[in-house]
Image (cartoon, grey):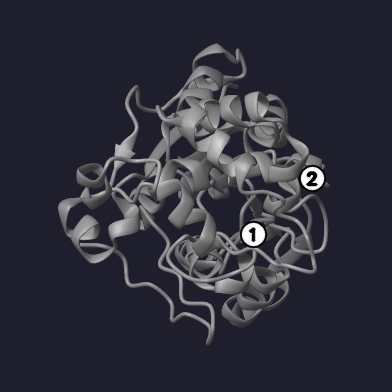
Amino acid sequence: MPPELPPDPPGFEHRPVLAAEVLAGFEPLGELLGQHPGGGLLIDCTLGGGGHSALLLEAHPGLRLIGLDQDPSARAAAAERLAPFGNRVEIVATNFADYRPPAPALAVLADLGVSSPQLDVAERGFSFRSEGPLDMRMNPCDGETAAALLDRLDEGALADLIYGYGEERLSRRIARRIKEQGPWDDPRQPRTTAELAWLVGGCYPPAARRGRLHPATRTFQALRIAVNDELGVLERWLEQVPHWLLPGGLLAVISFHSLEDRRVKTAFRSDPLLERISRKPLVASAEEAEANPRSRSAKVRLARRRP
């Protein structure tokens, strides 16, 4: 049975994926905490609404939490959800690749997915299913927007980006159409996510537009990854995170597409400080996949710091 999840804060409805698998993978925390009577540190690198962290704090009363997130709306939601845990919780506004922990941790968790509120709030510009600005920044106060990126890149570079980060076979056709229809970052004539999605869909033959996957899915994924440097951030963090852990400490990473999972798998296999707990990633149960469609592409890999 999936664990009973804490209630969502108003305005930030998000169901954490693979919660049962994370709890089971972190079950050895009970024994580890027994070896550290003063308590132990959990670092949640992508705090979101705090769902995973709330479950782990409830399951392991000896844990204290440092939760990281660069999204102010996520931090506010997490602070509300985690308020019952009082001074066991500290929330830090940062990108996890830029963070340096104050002490070694017993457990580190990273959920690399975009949260439901980020996808569902049109003003964030992540989703092609609603009308919103072409933004896509995880930190809405910093960095280049998707619209500015579309204008900055030439056609060839944009095609390479859409193919490399979105694995989109029609990348050259899509890039050509995007550049023909520019500029995209003109404040006098704001362009929208719906407009870009319609343009990308028009690059597909009519029969292909009616498939299970929306034609704009891969292009939007590629732009979001590029705007937030998601793969570069992940690679830098994977180099650092083994040093965040105490010997025997646990690490869990939840990924949502092959570009992420491939990097996590390689790091877990090649880093001499890490020992894989399972050779294959864990995926959502049929029950969870039915209840939460966004869990269907999720995979969690688990490792421990070698003694």
Residue 134's disc number: 1
Residue in the image at 81% along x and 42% along y: 98
Task: Please tell me how crowded label 1 is: few (under 14), some (14-19), or many (20+) other residues with Cα within 10 Å.
Answer: many
Query: Which picture quadrant has residue 93?
Result: bottom right
Q: Residue furthest left?
A: 286
56 with respect to 239 (left or right)? left
* Numbered marks: total: 2
Q: Quadrant of the C terminus?
A: top right
The foreground one among 141 and 268 is 141
Residue placed under numbered mark 2 in the picture = 101
* Residues at discs 1 and 2 in contact (Cβ within 8 Å): no
Which numbered disc, 1 or 2, marks the residue that appears first in the sequence? 2
Determine whether 234 is above or below 138 in the image.
above
- Near-viewer residue (244 or 206): 206
Q: What element carries label 1?
A: loop
**Place of residue 228 in the rendered image (x, y in percent of width and height, measured from the top left):** 69, 45
